[in-house]
Image (tube, helix red, strand yellow):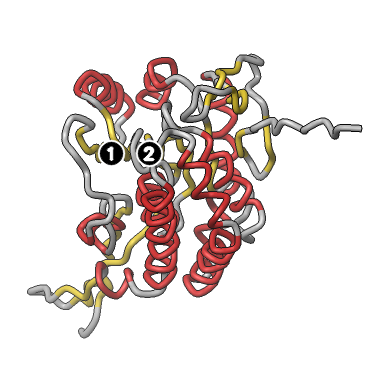
């Protein structure tokens, strides 16, 4: 008897659990040859709000963890990606990307995770400071996470691009709600499975799939999202900035119209972390 092939049912990763869209809507995903591969959930504004609630619950505990522990957990994620690297590369080739290019992206993504794992206990020393002042005070500046960061992934580099946006946020103790690539959503589904086994607390990273035009207005105006980071076209950038001005959130956007070299060193490091943290300055009286 011929064995019936079991088709995978992709689910989004929200609050440490795997969910279908509350609407039940899906989009058919086809491979490079045009054959049906899977049904991808189309998340709604309700799903986005649920993801923000999950991020709000997980955020304080994640922020209170030691920098060393956050680094250990990120390194564990790199281990999970290394173990399933071939599968992750295969998911990228669904869109027609060559096997060698997909493998190169996965390798770079793993290296980027390790890069930020090393930054968890170093960015404070680089970005914080002791400030000389002309008064009898000891003045110093320390960093603090912003809270919940909304992430808009690029359509190209669905793994490296997505992680390059998520990692600077969670390295410093933020939690994240991310909208995956529209054209290549399946790699984010696999990434969610790896996050679930990486020791990262549920709700710190929440991954959604869906139509950007339906979700961007909620990303822009949701008051619990304290920052928006990602890649957007001109129309999306306008909508995000207008909504962000109303709800007073930080906006850090790259232009979708311009090519982005996700392998570049300038897209990783302390400056990327700086964009998604806040600074607190303390004046401590000294002397007479």
Residue projecting furthest to the right:
1
Do the CB atoms of the residues marked 1 and 2 lie less than 8 Å apart?
yes
What secondary structure is marked by label 1? strand
In this picture, is 91 found above or below 273? above
Q: Could you tell me which quadrant the C terminus lies in? A: bottom left
Give the camera-side residue of 186 and 236: 186
Residue depicted at x 21% and y 85%? 287
Q: Reading the chain from its start, which is encountered first: label 1 or label 2?
A: 2
Residue 27: image quadrant is top right
Q: Could you tell me which quadrant the N terminus lies in? A: top right
User: How many labels, in total?
Assistant: 2
Please name the residue that numbered disc 1 is placed on: 250
Q: Is residue 157 left or right of residue 254?
A: right
Please name the residue that numbered disc 2 is placed on: 226
What secondary structure is marked by label 2? strand
Q: Position of residue 103 (x, y in %)?
A: 43, 55
Q: Is residue 11 left or right of residue 239?
A: right
Give the camera-side residue of 86 and 243: 86
Q: Position of residue 191 (x, y in %)?
A: 55, 47
């Amino acid at each position: 008897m011929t064995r019936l092939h079991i088709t995978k049912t992709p689910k989004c990763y929200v609050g440490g659990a795997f969910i279908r869209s509350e609407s039940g809507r899906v989009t058919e995903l086809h491979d490079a040859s045009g054959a049906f591969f899977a049904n991808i959930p189309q998340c709604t504004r309700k799903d986005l709000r649920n993801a923000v609630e999950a991020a709000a619950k997980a955020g304080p505990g994640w922020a209170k963890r030691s920098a060393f522990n956050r680094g250990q957990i990120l390194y564990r994620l790199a281990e999970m990606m290394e173990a399933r690297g071939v599968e992750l590369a295969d998911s990228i080739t669904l869109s027609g990307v060559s096997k060698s290019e997909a493998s190169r992206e996965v390798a770079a993504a793993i290296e980027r995770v390790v890069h930020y794992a090393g930054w968890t206990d170093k960015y404070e020393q680089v970005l914080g400071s002791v400030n000389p002042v002309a008064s009898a005070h000891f003045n110093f500046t320390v960093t603090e996470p912003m809270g919940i960061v909304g992430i808009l992934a690029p359509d190209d580099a669905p793994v490296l691009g997505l992680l390059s946006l998520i990692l600077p946020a969670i390295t410093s103790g933020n939690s994240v709600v991310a909208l995956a690539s529209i054209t290549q959503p399946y790699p984010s589904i696999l990434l969610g499975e790896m996050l679930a086994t990486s020791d990262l607390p549920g709700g710190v990273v929440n991954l959604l799939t869906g139509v950007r035009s339906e979700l961007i207005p909620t990303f822009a105006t949701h008051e619990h999202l304290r920052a928006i980071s990602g890649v957007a076209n001109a129309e999306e950038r306008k909508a995000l900035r207008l909504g962000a001005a109303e709800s007073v959130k930080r906006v850090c956007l790259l232009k979708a119209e311009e090519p982005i070299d996700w392998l570049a060193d300038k897209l990783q490091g302390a400056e990327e972390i700086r964009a998604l943290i806040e600074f607190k300055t303390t004046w401590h009286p000294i002397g007479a």
